[in-house]
Amino acid sequence: MNRKAVTPLDIIIIIAVVVLSLGIMLASLFSNSGNKAVITVNEQVVAEYNLLNNVKKEIKTQYGVNTVEILNGECFVSFADCRDGICVSRGKISKIGESIVCLPHKLIVEIK
Ligand SMILES: [Zn+2]
């Protein structure tokens, strides 16, 4: 008998191990991913968006304009007429607890 031959049982075990480790990997990858972006202005919630939907929303307030976008599960401010531009340069957020703050406009985008 060739002891190096791969038996069907070996293949089942290998597949089981691969599926299991992939599952653990995916679970840890998505466990802290938020599922919605909550936009507040002056501590008032003005909009909530599911991260699964691509959204482009212009938030106009008395303070100014911010364009909030959700693309492929990530949320970011693509445009703002604030004086510092920190909200735009903050980049993309997608994990629970991450936030984009636009201080001049009193605008906060938070992932929940
Ligand atoms: Zn800003």
Image: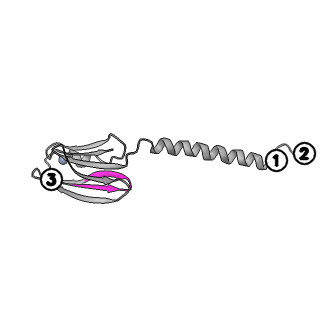
- Estimate the x, y position of residue 76 in percent, counting from the top left: 29, 51
Image quarter in which the C terminus is found: top left
Label 2, residues with CA under 10 Å away: few <14, some 14-19, many ≥20: few
Does the residue tagged 1 have its C-beta within 8 Å of any atom of ligand 1? no
Look at the image and give the residue range highlighted in magenta. Answer: 67-77
Amino acid tagged 1:
Ala
Q: Secondary structure at mark 2?
A: loop
Question: Is residue 58 in the magenta section?
Answer: no
- What residue sits 49% from the left and 41% below the top? 28
Q: Looking at the image, do the residues carrying marks 2 and 1 touch, with CB atoms under 8 Å apart?
A: yes
User: What residue is shown with label 3?
Assistant: 81
Amino acid tagged 3:
Asp
Q: Looking at the image, do the residues carrying marks 1 and 3 touch, with CB atoms under 8 Å apart?
A: no
Label 1, residues with CA under 10 Å away: few <14, some 14-19, many ≥20: few
Q: Secondary structure at mark 3?
A: loop
Dot 3 or dot 2, earlier in sequence: 2
User: What residue is shown with label 2?
Assistant: 1
